[in-house]
Every structure is written in C-alpha cells, then in structure tokens.
Image (spheres, rainbow, N blue to C red):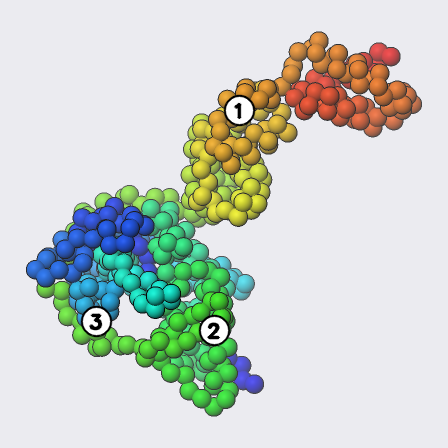
Amino acid sequence: MKAYETVIGLEVHVELATKSKIFCGCTTQFGGDPNTHVCPVCSGMPGTLPVLNKQVVEFAMAAGLALNCSITQKCKFDRKNYFYPDLPKAYQISQLYLPICRDGGIEIETEAGKKTVRIHEIHMEEDAGKLVHDPWEDCTLVDYNRCGVPLIEIVSEPDMRSAEEVIAYLEKLRLILQYLGVSDCKMQEGSLRADINLSVREVGVPEFGTRTEMKNMNSFKAIGRAIEGERKRQIELLEDGGKVIQETRRWDDNKDTSFAMRSKEDAQDYRYFPEPDLPPIEISDEWLQAVRAHQPELRDEKMLRYEKEFGIPEYDALIITGSKQLADLFEKTVALCQKPKEVSNWLMVETMRLLKEQEMDPEEITFTPAQLAGLIKLVDGNKINRTVAKEVFEKVFKENVDPEAYVEKHGLGLVSDDGVLRSAIRQVIENNPQSVRDYMGGKSRAMGFLVGQAMKEMKGKADPGMVNQIVKEMLDAM
C-alpha cells in the first residue's frame, strides 16, 4: 500500500458576542421560543434595509489583529445568492472580494514541535436560521431566531496534516477569541463551528488531491473522528482505483461515517455581486489604532506574567491560563487575598478534582473570587484547618454557599481553647496506654497516633499545631 499524506484546511464560523444582530436590533441571545428573535429585516421581508452593527466590525478587527492578520481598511460586503429554507431572503450578506482581514497565522504545538498555521482570510457575514428535522411527523421545521446573528469566518490555508494538529489549532483559536471577548465559543450552542476541507495525496507528490468538505462540525471529538474516517475513506477509494469527488459530505457521529450531500459549489455558483444596500466600510487609522489599543493580554503573555509576578510554577500557569474563566478567577481572587500560591493550589487541586468529578468545564464554575478568597482567609487566620476547608470548599463549589457563614452555622471553626484541648488529649492518653508505653520506649511514631486520636476526638476541629504541642508536653511530663 502506498504512503499517503492528509492535507486539511478549516473554515471556522464564529458567532460574535454582540447583544444585537449584524444588520438589525434583534437580540442574539441563545435559545428563546422559535421565531421570537426576529423582525422584518432578519426575516427577509421585502423593502427592508440592513444597518451595519459597528461592534461587529470592531470584533472582526480585534480577531484579525490577534491572529496576526493585515486589516483591509477599505472593505465591503457582497451578496451571496442561494435559496435554502433557513435563509428567508434567498441570499446571504457576506464578504468575498475584500474581506476585512487577510494573511495571518497562529503558532501551534505539535509532536514535532512548533508549527505555524497560516490564515488566508477572515470575513464578516450573517448567520442563517436553523432547520429542525422532526422524524416523528416526517417534516422539517424552521427556526429563524439565528438569522442575522453576526459571524466571522476564519479561513485557514491547507497547512494541517492530522486530526491532532486540527484540534491544537482549534483549541488555540478558541482560547484567543475567548480572551478577546469577541465570542463565548460554546460549541454545544453552535457559537463555534468548523467546516473541514480534507484531501489525501501520496507522500512526496506536490499537487493537492481532490478535497471534500464536511460542514458544521461542533465537537472536538467528532472533528477528530470525522478526519480519521474521511481520510480512511479517501485512501481506500484511491487504492481500489476510484476517484475522490469534490463534494460536501455530512458526518454522522453515531454511525461513525460520512454521507454525500451535494457536489461542492464554487464561487460562481453563488452569483456573488457587491451588496447594493450597504456602503463600503472605511476603517480609518484612528479607528484601527483605537481597537489595537484595547487588545487584552492573551494567554502567552499572561503565562509569563503569572510566573514572574506571582511566582507560580510554569505548569500551574499553563493550566490556569488554559481557561479565561480560571484566569479571571485567579487574578480577582489574588487581588482580594494577596495569596497567589494559595489561590493557585485551590484551583489546581480541589477545583480541578471537582470539575472532573462533576464532568464540568471551567466555564461552568459558579463560585466567586470573594468566596474563594474568604475561604483562604479563614485558613490563613487559623479559623479552620485544611481538612475542614476542603469540606467547605466542596459546598462552595456545588452550592455557592458563603464559606464564613457555613463554618459558623455548622460549628466547624477551630477549637483553640487550651482547657478544652487538654481535657480531650488527657482522655486520649488515658485510653491508649500502649501507645504511651511505646512513646516512652523511644517509638516516636506513637505520638503521631495519639495526635491523630486527639484530632478525631475533636472531630477535626482542633488546631493541629496546638494539639501536637500539648500531646508532647503531656507525654514528656509523664
């Protein structure tokens, strides 16, 4: 069998986090009853005119700058004509000839080291509606709520060679966009979707093979399986003497296979022409500079700062900055308690453990920086010990309780009353004469056992330092 190389390029559709749609004032909020977030403009009524949302342009510029693109300061919209039930106007307003961003790229980590994936262009466009297929009634329903939601489409060059490289590219892209605040990139809500353009060729052959496209993939796991499945299908087809047909295919993740949908359209099939209802966009130097000046600190810069400013390990900085939610939580909590290493430890150990147990993403965390800072201050102030703190944190994580109020309500504060501790420890010593004899005989571990029994007697609410001190004092006095 011949050796084949996979060639992959992506078209990534990103829903922008504006409050209103790209050409009208309808809300972009996810969900809502079908066909309630619509108006005459986004539902394509005759005689209506679009008005461009300025923030869409600024978000597109911000994304382009972060992805090292050049900004097209004189760009325009084009009309892409096609009829489909989820596009009521029978055309989509997009950009073909003068997209807002071009010629960028981002660096990803691969098994072979660092690699740059080039970005061909980024263009702005409006989203279409959503088709809901009802197998029970054997019909298809249309929800137009998504019509007119602003998108940027990020088109890469065919620089990726494996599913691993594609996932690395998408993960970095998603993180950059989340840090910018231009999109929440919630794949389960369709905020980030990828079209996979894939072909195979014999190793060493310079020409690309015939590509297929799998559209609207919104899960990293499904994307990985789809790439491997389509790669295998194309290689088997070529090995059997067949030809790959340029077409759009649909990946069925349940059946682990793809199906042909339609032959792949080219630009001429859409009969593009300049959008007559929108004037060209002129981006002044001042406007571009204003957007550039508001670019936030991205992950790579943040990692270096965390290590230098807060003194946390490189691995911790890598994990914490791997989620904007975690990074924001870290910084705001540190600002409240001034204990960066403590905050890092709580996020890296207990938070990560509970996220894994609850099968949650960091973006689903609901506790606040004030709650975590409050818990850290309770431990630091010797109000509770770490064992109790872990119990309280679990309640904070799952039920959003106030840590100080929870400790007070359940009587979990440390007992530091000398008389109470001595009474409990005296009882433990009397109940464990063999351990006392062992200690007297030079077995220092026996003291650890007695300390443990004393902590158990106090239900974990004693100050361990005081318990150790009093146990040793009592034993040495015998």
Q: Residue at the spot x=16%, y=60% of the render? A: 44
Residue 188 pos. (x, y %):
40, 55
Whole-percent x, y for residue 198 in the image? 41, 74
What residue is at 17 percent from the left and 53 percent from the top?
39
Look at the numbered disc 1 and give the secondary structure of its residue. helix
| Amino acid beneath label 1 | Tyr
The amino acid type of the residue labelled 2 equals Thr
Mark 2, other Cα within 10 Å: few <14 / some 14–19 / many ≥20? some
Name the element at disc 3: loop
Image quarter in which the N terminus is found: bottom right
Q: Where does label 1 land, which residue?
A: 406
**Above or below: residue 194 compared with residue 335:** below
Q: Is residue 439 above or below residue 21?
A: above
Q: Position of residue 87 (x, y in %)?
A: 22, 64
> Of helix, strand and loop, which one carries label 2?
strand
Give left or right: position of 119 versus 7: left
Residue behind mark 3:
82
Where residue 163 appears, as percent x and y from the top left, is 48, 66
Calculate the distance from the C-alpha at mark 2 to the C-alpha at mark 1: 52 Å
List the residue tagged with mark 2. Answer: 257
Q: How many marks?
A: 3
Looking at the image, the residue that sits furthest to the bottom is 241
Furthest toward the left, the residue is: 47
Residue 333 disc label: none
Report which quarter residue 2 is drawn in: bottom right
Q: CA distance from mark 2 to mark 3?
A: 28 Å
Amino acid type at circle 3 is Tyr
Left or right of 289 in this view: 375: right
Is 429 placed above or below 224 here?
above
Q: Which one is earlier in the sequence, the residue at label 3 or at label 1?
A: 3
> Along the line of sight, which residue is nearer the eye, 264 or 252?
252
Assign the C terminus to one quadrant of the image.
Answer: top right
